Image (cartoon, helix red, strand yellow):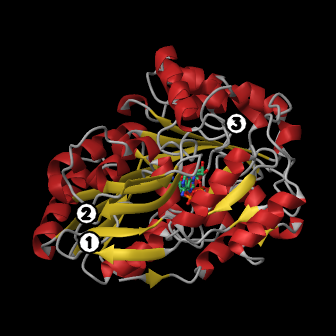
Amino acid sequence: MLVNFKRVTTLVSFIRRCSTLSKSLPELTKDRYPNIKRGDYAELNQNHLDYFHGLLGQNRVLSDPSDCEMYNIDFIKGVRGYSQCVLKPQTTEEVSKILSFCNQHRLAVCPQGGNTGLVGGSVPVFDEIVLSTSLMNNIISIDNISGVVVCEAGCILESLDDVLREKGLMMPLDLGAKGSCNIGGNVSTNAGGLRLLRYGNLHGSVLGIEAVKANGDVIDCLSTLKKDNTGYHLKHLFIGSEGTLGIVTKVAVHGPSKPKSLNLALLGLHSFENILQTYERAKNDLSEILSSCEMMDERSLDVVTSHLKLKSPIGDFPFYMVVETSGSNEKHDEEKLNAFLEGVMSEGIVADGTVTNEPGKMRAIWDLRERITEGLLHDGYLFKYDISLPIKEFYSLVPKMKERLGSDASRVSGYGHIGDGNIHLNISVPEFSPDILKKVEPYVYELTSTYKGSISAEHGVGFRKPPYIHYSKSENAISLMKDLKKMMDPNGILNPYKVLPS
Ligand SMILES: Cc1cc2nc3c(=O)[nH]c(=O)nc-3n(C[C@H](O)[C@H](O)[C@H](O)COP(=O)(O)OP(=O)(O)OC[C@H]3O[C@@H](n4cnc5c(N)ncnc54)[C@H](O)[C@@H]3O)c2cc1C
């Protein structure tokens, strides 16, 4: 079976919707971060372009600056490169030839999927060639019995999920950017999302990978087996390495069965302590049917109600939770959920709430949570941090940062995956300011490290965090990462300036 997705309009409209927010272009990364120096790479010339035209044809090589612009700017408009060349291969063989050529000619390459990454990893820092996987979007096979889907890296997550759902299956991950992000980008960032609590991370769900190394060698580890203990588990090198060790071209993912019964509750709570109590009760009372447990503070909800004009079905509270159950028996699940809700409300842990199994109402509740990032962009410039913390300290950074920044910040807010101990701390300011940046970093990472958290829970390290990776990884671990990088990409052409400190 080969299903080809026409590039769905959601990608274009999602990115356009967000580009209209700021008419002016963000400052070039090289100017905003003058300490980063361009590596010793070749500059693109006509001979290079002639080779790419010969390989891909005219239409799959973009070199007009206006065509290249959206590939140079990241989703939150915090970084901007000035690449003059975007390549759109359609096959693994083409990716292999491109990389082999770039390696020989020392041309740096920035792999890009849906460009929804939030750490500046998906766009060039200087003039790296963008290799977009957007046209590699075929589903190769779906095995209804095992639930394994094999597809190309450029498949859009939501489109994959739609196809699987028609067959009684689903994708094991779900995130706010699903209408635009690509499975190759998801794998390369080891994306977490809204249901990691239930289905675990991609190191578990991804069964196989095909990837192309910097020198063009194709590494075929596209196993569809659940168990395969032959030698080193090389696929894990590509999961979460953010395009620095190779370009993912195909993946095999295990899709769980689509639940027959779904319920969603939006709860209002008076304190963070109440969130912890509710989460603990949800784990115990709902156990195997609990599929998502999210939290947001009032300032996070405010961005979607005030900027995006979404309506909340419950009154105003300092904190909110979204609790989802999914299972196979509607009556059983409803009974369990009702007993849980009655318990937490009668004990005053939850102040108010609404529960629904109607698809439209569930979508409206999910929008309140999933569109927060989009809403925050209306505030101005966004300093965005994705942090893992021990559960008791989950919310500690928000009040601390609020106090530290005072009137410098127009909004300090927090929301995230409470069930995974992963908070998204957001600091909104009218426009980028290096002075505010100095107040926030490295303080935010020092604090995270003091609490024994991780400076990146699910978004990765990208361009924004390499100087701070030592807060979460030991010197020897970083040194081994550098050795691996050198071995797999000796010329350093793949996504330079990202992940590893220079
Ligand atoms: C509204 C919104 C909500 C989000 N919610 C979540 C969330 O809940 N959980 C979460 O984890 N993330 C979330 N993200 C971040 C982002 O969507 C994820 O990181 C996603 O996995 C990126 O996929 P992409 O296709 O857009 O990759 P890109 O942004 O294009 O790239 C991300 C990184 O992967 C590399 N890359 C991309 N494709 C390949 C490839 N084929 N081979 C090798 N390297 C590649 C890029 O070079 C870059 O370093 C969210 C983003 C937005 C805008």
Give whichever of 368, 288 is nearer the camera: 288
The residue wearing badge 1 is 262
Give whichever of 327, 179 is nearer the camera: 179
Residue 325 bears which disc, if any?
Answer: 2
Which tag, 3 or 1, sits closer to the chain's start?
1
Q: Residues within 10 Å of mark 1 (few under 14, many from 20)?
A: many
| Cβ atoms under marks 2 and 1 closer than 8 Å | yes
Residue at image position (21%, 49%) is: 228
Secondary structure type for disc 2? strand
Residue 497 bears which disc, if any?
Answer: 3
Give whichever of 184, 368 is nearer the camera: 184
List x then y, in percent, for residue 490: 61, 34
Residue at mark 3 to residue at mark 1: CA–CA distance: 43 Å
Instruction: Tell us which disc is closer to us: 2 or 3.
Output: 3
Residue at mark 2 to residue at mark 1: CA–CA distance: 6 Å
Name the residue type under label 3: Tyr
Which tag, 2 or 3, sits closer to the chain's start?
2
- Please say if 497 is above or below 149: above
